[in-house]
Amino acid sequence: MSTLETNLVQPSTGTTLTLGASGDSISIPSGATIANSGTATGFGTNAPGFHANRSSGQGMLDNTSTLIAFNAETYDSNSAYDTGTGKFTVPSGEGGKYFVYVSCVISSNAGGNDINTADVILKKNGSYAAAASWDTNGYGDKLMLEINVTLDLSASDYLEVYVTMDSATGSNCTVGGNSWDTSYFGAFKLQGV
């Protein structure tokens, strides 16, 4: 093995510089730093990923499991979340471990302390994957439930969020609402696991 010492390497044609050939390994030793000022491609990212929220409140009936459609996206790297259906579908070739998070602010439409119980359920392919529950025994009119979980997902698996609230007075409720009642749903693929 020989050592090449220089301060600049660039292609003679001004297009692409190739290091190594197929099957080779390029080693960056401990203590070395790669500084990038251009566009980095082919490196690990936390994509696919998305974050969506409710831009306004979604009403639901008392004691009824309701699919929540988070109708506004902050980002969606692979266009894999559907704001109309509330469904995130793993893109082709993107199976792996995903960190999934949900936060739902649930408010009683009646006001006062009439929420008995509330549940937020994350479903994978229509079946239970994770949940958060609250039992206030009639002492709440607004609460926030959160889910943070890592899931193994395969291409075409899909995730949805359902909410159920039981009111002591039979009142309906609202999920999300205004800027301080933020309800959101997101996920991103974990790299290196």
Image: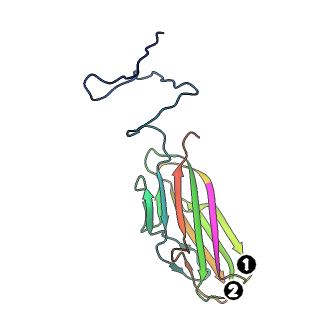
- Residue at label 2? 113
Query: Residue 136 — which label?
Result: 1
Position of 51 with respect to 130 (left or right) is left
Establish if 100 lies above or below 174. above
Total numbered labels placed on residues in the image: 2
Q: Which quadrant holds the C terminus?
A: top right
| Principal secondary structure, stretch drawn in magenta | strand
Q: Which residues are magenta?
A: 141-149
Image height of 108 relative to 185, above or below: below
User: Dot 1: what SS?
Assistant: loop
Name the residue located 47 percent from the left edge and 46 percent from the top edge: 94
User: Within the image, what quadrant is residue 115 found in?
Assistant: bottom right
Asked if the residue at tag 2 contacts the one at tag 1, i.e. Cβ–Cβ closer than 8 Å, the answer is yes
User: Which amino acid lies under the numbered mark 2 shown in the image of this protein?
Assistant: Asn
Q: Is residue 16 left or right of residue 101?
A: left
Seen at 48% across and 24% down, the residue is 26
N-term-proximal mark, 1 vs 2: 2
